[in-house]
Image (cartoon, rainbow, N blue to C red):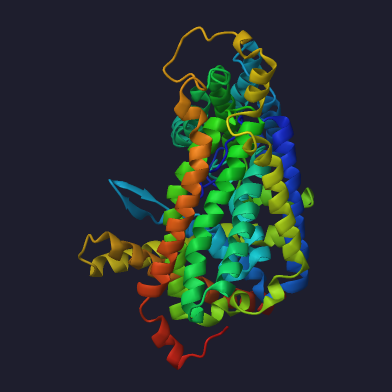
Amino acid sequence: MRPPETESRPGTRLRRAPPRVKLLAALVLVAATTLLPRRLGPAYLVPAAVLGGLWLASRMPLLYALRRLLVAQTFILGIALLSLFSPSARPGFPAAVSKSNLCILALLVLGWTTPFPELLQALRRLRLPSVMLTTLALMYRYLPVLAEEARRMQRARASRTFSRNRRLAWQNLGAILGGLFVRTADRAERIYLAMCARGWK
Amino acid sequence: MHLPDGFLDAKTALLSTAAAAAGVGLALRQARTTLEPRQMPMLGLAAAFVFAAQMLNFPVGGGTSGHLLGGVLTAILLGPAAAVLVMTCVLIVQCLVFNDGGLLALGANVFNMAIVNVCGGYFVFRLLKRLARMENRRATVFAAAFAGWFGTVLASMTCAGQLALSDQSPWSVAFPAMVLAHILIGVGEGLATGLITMAVLRARPQLLAGTGGSAGALGAGFLGYGLLVALGLVVFVAPFASPWPDGLETAAKALGFAGQATPPLIKGPVSDYRLPFISSMAAATAVAGVIGALLAFIGAYGLARFLAPGLDAAKKDAPSGN
């Protein structure tokens, strides 16, 4: 679950559009799709056509989108299946699944054309409180660092544990994550000092 | 429990977004007054920690595995206000970067997982920790393990309520399916929460000192969260919970036009209300919830009492932070 690399993507016009506009457009598109009637109909072609056009304009690779859509299907179907168990809600099943997929496609195009730092800029312009902005920025920056640290700790543990005992596995994972939290707290302390040294208030 | 877009209708999405905004606003105000500047980077790092922790899989058995959700754990480690902000940021990144959970459903997801889960779980944590007649650290592990289970189940209840309120699936289906699944998922969450709390207590007990001890944290801010969680349960769960099978159905039967509903074209094997087991599922789920709570309680107690070696030994060389 690495954040997608955005630097090497083609510089299309969508890529250069203001991030705030793209974020709001995605929100409008998602809201409009969600408000569609509960039965599949020709109205569904409108957001589909808009998204298709945006997809082409963004030059998002087919495989990139399909892989992410496929991952999302488990969550969508899991919840959509609940509507199959009652005759009154059953016609909503294909509609809900299509709506969900269209909305995910909107978010995929947004993510493909807008690197996360630009999204943060957009959120700043939309007046998200600064505590949240700092948290989001630090989180995004340190996500790969901590993920790598967690994997390293797990690898070290695995190379010393020759057992498939499930109880041991749980205890070990608990210890690893507890250790990771302690390291995270230490790292936060160091980051705070480094930020102060660079004039952060 | 991440709701994708397309399942909630406008009124439910707006209602839950308003509730989520109120909770996050409350947490922001509390964070501004109580958090020191020194703790600011910790919020971002904790969010990254939750994310990294979700990548490691706990073996469940039968080839399946599950991962930590982390809301209650964060609340225990950092306090409820910080945890609400941390989990909100985790959900925002999951939505925008990883397409996990919808954009319009973000409010509902924040409400369920960053507010109901965090605050409900933390409240139970504080309550149990005070009531438990155990040595302080064992009491913390016990309370953490049970709170992890409780928060997960509570959040699944409001999630089911939101699905039912937007007519996506009837309460008699959504409630048992969501809650029964999370009674099981919660066992893993509780166990992981307890084990990680135990590991932190062993390695660095002073990290928990801020949230484990004095009654200060249970102040006015906490009243606000309690009110918000209660409000969520009243809006999303209570309307369905009172007449067990289905309010509308009962009314239809009472007025005598139940039979006039158009018969389904295909008589599927699962047309509900004809199968007694589906309509009684909600009641059965409530019973299962009570039994699950009892078992989780006993399990958490056993974990803290018998499976937490070394906690007392650690006490000797480092005075308890609480």
Q: Nearer the viewer, residue A151 or B308?
A: B308
Q: Nearer the viewer, residue A51 or B53?
A: B53
Quadrant of residue B129 in the image? bottom right
Dividing the image into 4 quarters, which one contains the C terminus of chain B? bottom right
> Who's the residue at 21% across and 63% down the image?
A163
> Who's the residue at 47% across and 34% down the image?
A78
Is residue A167 shown left or right of residue A45? left
- From what the image shows, is residue B188 above or below residue B39? above
Q: x, y (%) of residue B38?
A: 67, 76
Q: Nearer the viewer, residue A151 or B62?
A: B62
Q: x, y (%) of residue B58?
A: 37, 56
Q: x, y (%) of residue B296?
A: 44, 58
> Who's the residue at 78% across and 48% down the image?
A126
Q: Nearer the viewer, residue A146 or A56?
A: A146
Residue A11 seen in the figure: no
Q: x, y (%) of residue B41?
A: 63, 69
Residue B239 seen in the figure: yes
